[in-house]
Amino acid sequence: MTRAASPQTLAGRFPDDFLFGVATASYQIEGAAEADGRKPSIWDAFSHMPGRVKGGDTGDVACDHYNRLEADLDLMADLGAKAYRFSLAWPRLLPDGTGPINEKGFDFYDRLLDGLKSRGIEAFATLYHWDLPLALMGRGGWTDRTTAVAFAEYAGLATRRLGDRLDTIVTFNEPWCSVYLGHLTGVHAPGERSIEAAMSALHVTNLAHGLGVRAIRAERPEIPVGIVLNAMSVMAETEREADLNAEIRANDFHNGVFFGPLFEGAYPASVLQACPDLAESIRDGDLETISQPLDFWGLNYYTPMRVRDDPDSSFPHVATAPAVKPEKTDIGWEIEPRGLSHVVRYLYDRYRLPDFYITENGAADNTEIENGAVSDTMRLDYVSTHLSVAADLVSENYPLKGYFGWSLMDNFEWAEGYSMRFGLVHVDYQTQRRTIKQSGYWYRDLIAAHSGRLISAPRSRGRRDLPRRRW
């Protein structure tokens, strides 16, 4: 039995212009890994290495979205989604990362954008969701500054070719993951385990963001530009001074290395002191480039990061503290909706930030089809309780403008392969049959109830009129 709030009641707590959407990422759903001129990304290489991905799974086919585009667009429309957050596949557009463009790759995104426009769905594009063209690894990938220049060229080209139908552009999705999971812990592509590599990748990624923003605005200055960060909701295990100081250090290492340079033009002093490789990567003018004013930012939130002091470990000298709430999703993440409000309040107290969207939120619920339906009550409760917290934030005048459920459909969940299901829609990977889950129907009803209030004054379907409050 679900404990979810009534979708009609919850819908009434959001303002008329609040945007409800769904989200995906290219490598996780598109498949067609060798079709129409696409070349490998670092995730193609990584997933084909034995032992890297659970079950030996790869994104070769994924949800076959590349070949099922129209049906998936109809699915979004059936759910009532007002916006779609997706990512462009860099190796589909520029197969070698730089150089000749792939027209068939652009043809696919032309069809996607035209399909969204014809269905009245706003297009929120992400330029980088971890699928770096493999060719760019030859000179070090994200650890080499030339990749930042290549990204800026790609950003400008994508904006020039597709920007007339984009409502917003995001440079990077969750650089914390591509930097730390990809270069420090090695559980994501390219699989490095080096603090030196991580610090280099951190700075090059931040630099690429700044150069990318400049390139986007040079092409289409009217398009709102932002970045998506999976800011950690860091919570100390106890009120002991040592644990509270550990919380500060963890915030510097996990959040401050992105929010600091982007919104203050400076890295946290504690990280610069503890990680000299980062300081050595910074050149004159870099921080001015990185701190380009942004129109918005996106927050991806799933679970809190609980920490305690651990002086015997490497910087930031913290250890993982046990979960407080017993409820967990099927991937093992603690369910704590208050973590969402905790991180938002911390960030807006600490930094001067523009408007934001919750660009990902959802739960791994592996409930399968039974009698033709998927009763994923855990996911439904998760989404309902987190949306209730989002409504609280709006009522407290935090500038939250929209919510994107992760994910539209079950997909390739990176190192977890196909073992974890985050979708509002179930995917049978053998037949590619799509089945809307109970949570998907609930979300559809929420959007319908919210939209129903707008019948007398329908929302404009043109480009979103975000205030030009750039910080």
Image (cartoon, rainbow, N blue to C red):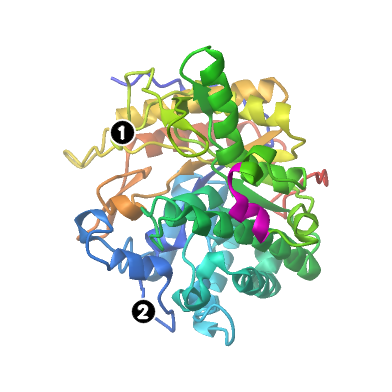
**Residue 201 in the figure: left or right of residue 372:** right
Left or right, 265 with reference to 44:
right
Asked whether 160 or 200 is in front, the reply is 200
Q: Is residue 120 visible?
A: no
Q: Of helix, strand and loop, which one carries label 1?
A: loop
Q: Amino acid at mark 1?
A: Gly
Q: Of circles 1 and 2, which is in front?
A: 1
Counting from the top left corner in percent of width and height, residue 80 is at 50, 44
Q: Earlier in the sequence, mark 1 or mark 2?
A: 2
Query: What secondary structure is the stretch in magenta mostly built from?
Result: helix
- Direction top: furthest residue: 239
The residue where tag 2 is placed is 34
| Residue 397 visible to the viewer | yes
Residue that appears at 42% across and 48% down: 408
Residue 371: x percent and y percent? 16, 39
Highlighted magenta segment, given as a residue range = 274-281
